[in-house]
Amino acid sequence: MRVHVVSDVHGAAEALARAGDGADALICLGDLVLFLDYADHSRGIFPDLFGAANASRMVALRTAKRFDEARALDRELWEGIDRRGAIETAVRKQYAELFAAFPAPTYATYGNVDIPALWSEYATEGTTILDGATAEIGGLVFGFVGGGLRTAMRTPYEIDEGEYAEKVAALGRVDVLCSHIPPAVPELCYDTVARRFERGSEALLDAIRGTRPKYALFGHVHQPLVPRMRIGRTECVNVGHFNATRRPWALEW
């Protein structure tokens, strides 16, 4: 059995259409939407609306952790614009293309920049959406936990620690623990290019220590200090920034 795993697709629909080639199934760990590309400031919803120069300003402020100034710039640019309507229109356009690219079968959960309420409108019959739920694939039990925890970035699908922990607990024992964000291990959470720690989950770390799955798979941290490490018997793997690599991570058994 061979499964391909991707995360942080961020608009790479053409590559996503090939991500399942040679695999029995595809797993997607979220962040389909491309709002602002930190590597190419001309790509994404934000520069489409406000131009690459303003995108560069926003990236610089966020990278410097000047979040109050970033929010002030955000308010200035959005003044007089129907923010919710403009974003939803752009996201819908991306989702239509991205969900059409999923092979069958695909098992997917949400990232922190995704809008869960829209997914059911675009998911085809071959795509199973899971969040705080499990699926059996090739005789192994895969558990899925979507979204991220609260941060100063205020991305669309950030939830409280308690709600996130409830989703993790609902899985019970699994062979493969799949999430968008990593467990709360500093080496797995530090982004060497953004030069900051992303939020990891203590609940995921507790589940790894307590239930000892064979694998814990995640994304979210685009340029991790450590992409892979073992915690007890569990192999913890950042499956990669698919928007940059265009390559899925493969799991075979």
Image (cartoon, rainbow, N blue to C red):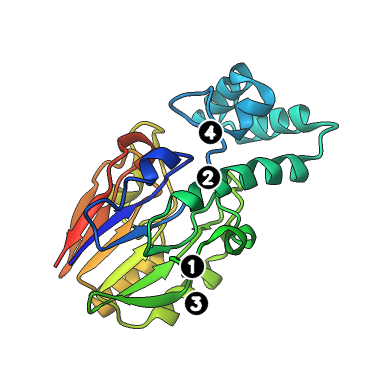
Q: Secondary structure at mark 4?
A: loop
User: What amino acid type should be assigned to the residue bearing mark 2?
Assistant: Glu
Write down the residue under mark 2.
97
Measured Cα–Cα span from mark 3 to mark 1: 28 Å
- State which tag comes first along the sequence, 2 or 3: 2
Write down the residue under mark 3.
166
Q: Secondary structure at mark 3?
A: helix
Residue 65 bears which disc, if any?
A: 4
When asked about the image quadrant of residue 171, the answer is bottom left
Residue 125 bears which disc, if any?
A: 1
Q: Position of residue 44 (x, y in %)?
A: 56, 32
Measured Cα–Cα span from mark 2 to mark 4: 33 Å
- State which tag comes first along the sequence, 4 or 1: 4
Q: Position of residue 74 (x, y in %)?
A: 70, 32
- Relative vertical location of residue 206 with respect to residue 58 in this rendering, above or below: below
User: What amino acid type should be assigned to the residue bearing mark 1?
Assistant: Glu
- State which tag comes first along the sequence, 3 or 1: 1
Residue 203 visible to the viewer: no
Residue 82 visible to the viewer: yes
Q: Are marks 3 and 1 in contact (CB under 8 Å)?
A: no
